[in-house]
């Protein structure tokens, strides 16, 4: 064989590989593929990822989740501004006495949290955010290294 440059060698190898006859698939491949497709089709939509959910169910879930999150944020805001369960829902407090106690506890907790946050130096908050970000990057890197080590093709 003569000395070839890189492009000629590439073309030679390409011609030789194209000249090879196509390989036949195993006889059991078709049955295995069809069985796998049937198994995937038998899985219920709610066991699949979000993309496979029906559009109406996704919309309803988003509406409910948005409503719950909005209610929770509103309640946190109102309790942090000094509102209690008595003036938020007098009817609820009248029918459920535990609601008043729960409102008082939540109000106390929100006041405590706001007091702690106001007294923490901003540098500590920035340092905490930086620490969490660095830990996230570290764990992501460790996960990527572990994945490469465990699933490296040999």
Image (tube, grey):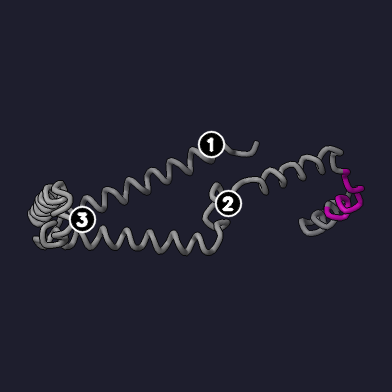
Q: Which residue is mark 2?
A: 45
Q: Residue at x 82, y 43 (%)?
A: 30
On the rendered structure, is 77 left or right of 134? left
Q: Which residue is mark 3?
A: 126
Can you tell which of label 2 and label 3 is closer to the viewer?
A: 2
Q: Where does residue 63 sit, x and y in percent of width and height?
A: 40, 64
Q: Which residue is mark 1?
A: 149
First along the sequence among labels 2 and 3: 2
Q: Residue at x 31, y 59 (%)?
A: 69
- Report the front residue among 71 and 15: 71
Q: Residue at x 37, y 44 (%)?
A: 138
- Report the front residue among 63 and 129: 63
Magenta segment: does it hold 21?
yes
Can you tell which of label 1 and label 2 is closer to the viewer?
A: 2
How far, Cα to Cα, is label 1 from label 2?
34 Å
Q: Is residue 91 visible?
A: yes
Magenta segment: does it hold 120?
no
Residues in magenta? 14-24
Q: Residue at x 45, y 62 (%)?
A: 60
């Amino acid at each position: 064989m003569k000395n070839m440059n890189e492009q000629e060698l590439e073309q030679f190898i390409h011609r030789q590989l194209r000249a090879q006859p196509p390989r036949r698939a195993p006889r059991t491949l078709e049955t295995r593929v069809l069985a796998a497709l049937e198994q995937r089709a038998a899985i219920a939509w709610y066991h699949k990822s979000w993309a496979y959910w029906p559009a109406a169910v996704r919309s309803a879930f988003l509406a409910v989740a948005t409503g719950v999150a909005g209610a929770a944020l509103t309640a946190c805001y109102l309790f942090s501004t000094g509102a209690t369960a008595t003036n938020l829902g007098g009817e609820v407090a009248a029918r459920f006495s535990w609601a008043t106690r729960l409102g008082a506890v939540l109000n106390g907790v929100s006041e405590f949290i706001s007091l702690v946050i106001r007294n923490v130096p901003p540098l500590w908050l920035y340092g905490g955010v930086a620490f969490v970000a660095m830990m996230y990057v570290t764990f992501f890197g460790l996960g990527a290294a572990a994945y490469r080590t465990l699933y490296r093709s040999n």
